[in-house]
Every structure is written in C-alpha cells, then in structure tokens.
Image (cartoon, rainbow, N blue to C red):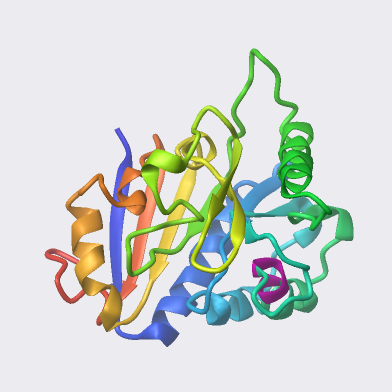
Amino acid sequence: MNKKKIIGKSDHEETSTYGAFLIGKIIKQNQHPTANIALSGGNTPKLMFEKLSKLEKLNWENVNIFLVDERYINLDNKNSNFNMIKNHLINNIDIPLENIKNVNYSNNINESAREYRDRIIKQFSLSKENPNPVFDLIHLGIGEDGHTASIFDLKKINNNKLIDITRGEKYKRITFTYKILNNAKNILFLATGDKKKKIIKKILEKDKKYAAANVENDGYIYYLFDKSAAALVKNK
C-alpha cells in the first residue's frame, strides 16, 4: 500500500523551497552509487528548480536527470521542457553532460521515442527478467484538466510500453507511461494556484477518469500544494 503525504505551504515561494529541500533529501538518500530522477516541465517548478540548484552538499556527479515528458520540438524552443529545465537548473549546477538524459529531437517522432526508451533500458540494465525501471524520484505536475506527464486521454496511452507518443493541445509529445510512473520509489506532485483547487480535490478523491489520479506506486507519494491550490483539501 502506498504512503501518501499531503503537504500544504502558504504560497508559491514556500512551496518551491520545500520542494527543493525534499528533492535534495531524496537525492542524498539514493546517491549510493547513483540517484535517478525524472523532472517535469511547466511554469510551476521553475522557482523550485532554481532553489534546488542552490542547495549545498549535493553531488550532482552521482545524479542522472531524465525528463518525464517532452514536446516533439527542437530542444532550444521556448516550449521545450528540456530548455526550461536547462535554464533553471542544469546550467546552474556542476553535472556531467552524460548524466543528462533528455529526449532528443529526431527527424521522426517514433525514432525520438525509441531512442529515449533505449537510453532508459541501458541506464537501468532492463531485461525480460527485469523489465521496469525504478526511479528514485519522479516529479510531476497536475494540469487544470487533471493530466499529468503528457497523459491526457487514458484510452490513448499504451501502458505495455515504457514510453508512448501522445498529443497535447499544440504538439505531439513523448511521455513516460504508468509502467514507469507507478514503479517509482518516490513521486512528488507539485501544484500551486487557485485554478488547480477543484481538480486537486478530485485527484485526491481518486476520481480515476483523471490521469493524475491513476498514479499509484508502492513507495511514497508527496502532494505538495500552496494554500490556494489546497483550498478544498481537508486535513492538509
């Protein structure tokens, strides 16, 4: 049975500070020999990533950073998740280039997805006997429509795969499936703002028609919200 913790903070600043502290703590606990983490994009985690980059006593040489999902666009595009994470975290830490496991933009989206899947298989030495990677931490957001990662329509995600291709409002996307998400040691949901309060209530009530409500692992799930986002949550 999973271990869920709902953490409420006063505002975006405090939420970001706590999120950075929590990620840093999980990294330190799992750096023997290597911590494997996966990060999501969006506007909400920018400040958290900046604060994470300033934490002392984190040995980034022993951390591999993956992306939970990515739009099928060039990596220098302003809408690229990798571009955001690079600007707010990666450029500000001392981490070897080979530790950055981003989705590469290829001529064909299937090629990009396949190459990313193969990087995961190699990193975790996956096989028929050991088919699923175990991430030490996966950070996720919650969309106003209840999506998480790039999982929008539950009927259009193939959870027999590690990586699948979906479509967002403007772009095709490459995303982790629940095969990866639900096998992580730690999940950190980060959401802030008044516009998220109604959907957060539904997610915590486990309304399974929403993608974020289907994230269930055997480890820890941290729901980290600010006061506005958690306005309808009881016992926060």
Outermost residue toward the top? 129
Measured from the top left, where is residue 110 in percent x and y?
A: 72, 43
The quarter of the rendered structure image containing the N terminus is top left
Name the side, left or right, on which 79 lies relative to 185: right
Name the side, left or right, on which 230 lies relative to 175: left
| Rendered position, 173 above or below 127 | below
Name the side, left or right, on which 233 lies relative to 41: left
The boundaries of the magenta stretch are: 81-85
| Rendered position, 175 above or below 75 | above
Residue at image coords 76%, 61%:
60
Residue at image coords 69%, 80%:
78
Does the magenta portion include 6?
A: no
Residue at image coords 67%, 48%:
35
The quarter of the rendered structure image containing the C terminus is bottom left
State whether the magenta stretch is mostly helix, strand or loop: helix
The quarter holding residue 115 reads top right
| Rendered position, 135 above or below 167 | above
The quarter holding residue 23 reads bottom right
The one nearer the camera, 119 or 110, is 110
Measured from the top left, where is residue 27 in percent x and y?
A: 61, 55
Measured from the top left, where is residue 173 in percent x and y?
A: 60, 56
Measured from the top left, where is residue 212 in percent x and y?
A: 35, 53
Outermost residue toward the right? 97
Counting every numbered tag in the picture gives: 0
The one nearer the camera, 55 or 130, is 130
Residue at image coords 77%, 68%:
75
